[in-house]
Amino acid sequence: MKRIGYIAVFLGAFLLSGCGSYSDGYDDGYDDGFYDGARVPQSDMVSLFLIDKNGYSISEVYYSCIDPYGVETPTYMTAPNGEFSFIPGERCTFDLDGLYGTPDDPVFIEDGRGYGKGDIPYRCIYDEGFTYEDGSFEYIEDDICTFYF
């Protein structure tokens, strides 16, 4: 009788644990190349990078996105390499708290090969326009900017 009890407990635990996997695009804290808070890129996403004037990545910048249907993502942070990910058609808002603004502290949006991403429409608190050919854009100290990807 004990054996049947053990089998029932094992079978119940197995069935309740489920099988397969689910990802909501949020880092689970495991060592998968990201840290807590980074949006884990999925196959339908594009990844770009925030870079400073010296070519260094800008990490831990908070951002969230809204898809074309108005659904908002959780708040993420740029990864240690400055990477952020989005689904084409999303508009993503970045909190540039701690950055000094242009021209003193330019920020560049680049692709994975180091090329600036020009012509991205954006709107910050006091300025709006398109990113320049080198991927830079106008912003003020501690600005909040929305990019229309």
Image: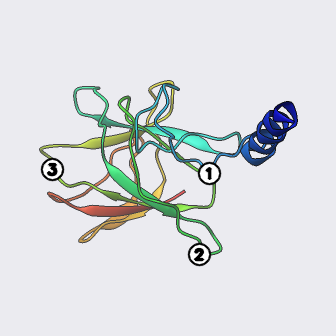
Q: Residue at x 13, y 50 (%)?
A: 100
| C-alpha span from label 1 to label 3 | 29 Å
Res. 49 in view: yes
Question: What residue did someone put label 1 on?
Answer: 24
Residue tagged 2 = 70
Q: Between marks 2 and 3, how big is the CA–CA gap?
A: 28 Å
Q: Residues within 10 Å of mark 3 (few under 14, many from 20)?
A: few
- The answer to whether any part of residue 19 appears in the image is no
Checking the image for residue 98, the label placed there is: 3
For the residue marked with disc 3, what is the amino acid?
Answer: Gly
Quadrant into which the C terminus falls: bottom right
Q: Which of marks 2 and 1 is nearer the N terminus?
A: 1
Q: Which of 18 and 68 is in front in this view?
A: 18
Find the residue positioned furthest to the bottom. Answer: 70
Displayed quadrant of residue 110: top left
**Nearer-the-camera pick, 94 or 37:** 37
- Viewer-proximal residue among 39 and 17: 17
Left or right: 24 as drawn, with respect to 114: right
